[in-house]
Structures are given as C-alpha cells and as structure tokens.
Amino acid sequence: MQRNIIITLILTGFMIAGCTHTTKNSQTQTPNSKSSSKDLESVEIREYQSEKLGSMNDFRENSIKGPQHVDMTTYKLAITGFVDKPIEYTYDEVLKHQNYSKVITIHCIEGWSVKLLWEGILVKDLVNEAGIKPEANTVIFHAYDGYTTSLPLDFIVDNDILIAHKMNDVTLPPERGYPFELVAEDKYGYKWIKWLTEIELSNNPDYKGYWESRGYNNDADLK
C-alpha cells in the first residue's frame, strides 16, 4: 500500500512539473508558481523546434582563471562609459527585461563547436536605457575574473546580441558563466565573455581585450 502511494506521488510530480519553452525571438513567459510549491532541478533540453542541440557538457574549460563563483549577494551589472546615466542592475532587475531565445553555435578557435539554445536579454535594451552618447562606437565587456573583450556598437545593435542567463532551458551553471554570458554570434569563442559584470560604452574602436592584446584578431569573424 505504501509503495503504491509513493509511485502515485512521483507520477503526479512529473505531470505537474512540465517544461516551459520559448519561441524564437519572442518574449519568454513563465507560469506563476504557488507559494507552497518547490523548485525542481531543471533538465537540459537537447532538441528545439526540430533542431538537434549539443550539451552544456560539450565545452572545454579554457578560462583564464578557471570557473568563477560570483557573489550574488553583492552582484551588479553596470552600464558605464559614454552613456547619459550610468546604471547598475541587480540580477533580478536584468531578468525583468524582455527575454529572447536563439539557437546559436559557439565556435572555439581551438577547433571545437557546440550548438545550443540561448535565452537572454538584448544588450541594446540595456544600453538604450542608459542613453547612448553620440561619440560611442564600441562596447567593452568586463568579467568577474578581470577578462575583457569588445565589439562594435553597430554590430551589437544590428545583430540583436544577447547576454544569456540560460542555455538549453537551464540556468547557466558557474562554469558556463553564471550569471551572464555574452552570446557573440558569428564571432569566435574568445568574444563570448562569461561572468559579465560591466558593459562599457567607449569611443575607442581599437580597444583590445585579454586575448586580442596577446595577438588574437580583434574582429574574431568566423572564417
């Protein structure tokens, strides 16, 4: 009798805990949870709109200081530089912006690649709130571990570049860039900065980040 009750409870839990998916380039909607419910661990999806996906486990660890564990009690994402009003967002404040999903392949200069579903917020939505000054032409991204990289402002705006907080419908784990990773589509992986802490508007189109200052091509275009 007790065994039958346990099985019934497990099956009921599976029926209730359905997956919520997003439509490509549309706002993400998540059902409201009842106060008495408990969050269950998310399960990574491996297919989206009939498209096969890779896994978050397909990455090689090659960050400059190893995986970072950001202190979320003090975390802020700062929008600085050539803006009308610098802004600091908490993690939850960033997530309140409209969310978008894209299936994009990250290509590492080491020769490996992974196709994933990325969900996040448009960079242009954040910098537009701060007000872009006319002289700004470059966006410099700063990470928790001191890593930096940059991209042209026009590229960011014209290509709807995201900062992601999820991959394959799962919140980024620390080793994949939690709280945010830049989804620098059509660029090599060294532009995909993880553990993002600051988005700086600059007037220096020649700015070189960590690897670019060590000889990597500043454009990082896929060949």
Image: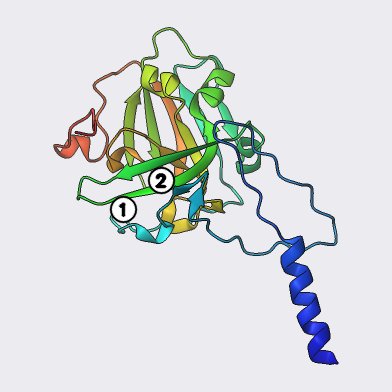
Which of the 4 quarters of the picture holds residue 104?
Answer: top left
Q: Nearer the viewer, residue 159 or 173?
A: 159
Task: Specify whether residue 195 is in view.
Answer: no
Cβ atoms at labels 2 and 1 below 8 Å apart: yes
The reply, left or right, for residue 158 in relation to residue 15 is left
The reply, left or right, for residue 82 in relation to residue 65 is right
Query: Percent x, y for residue 84?
Result: 54, 14
The reply, left or right, for residue 210 in relation to residue 33 is left
The reply, left or right, for residue 71 in relation to residue 203 is right
**How far is disc 2 from disc 1 in space, using C-alphas?**
9 Å
Q: Which residue is mark 2?
A: 194
* Residue drawn at 25 percent across, 52 percent down: 112
* Circle 2: element type: loop
Rendered image: mark on residue 63: 1
* Circle 1: element type: loop
Q: Earlier in the sequence, mark 2 or mark 1?
A: 1
Considering the image in quadrants, where does the C terminus appear?
top left
Give the crowd class for mark 2: few <14, some 14-19, many >=20 residues within 10 Å.
Answer: many
Q: Amino acid at mark 2?
A: Lys
Q: Residue furthest bottom?
A: 1
Query: Percent x, y for residue 151?
Result: 33, 26
Location of residue 167 with respect to 198 vertically, above or below: below
* Residue drawn at 30 percent across, 58 percent down: 60
Q: Nearer the viewer, residue 149 or 32?
A: 32
Query: Percent x, y for residue 198?
Result: 46, 35
* Residue drawn at 52 percent across, 43 percent down: 49
Task: Specify whether residue 163 is in view.
Answer: yes
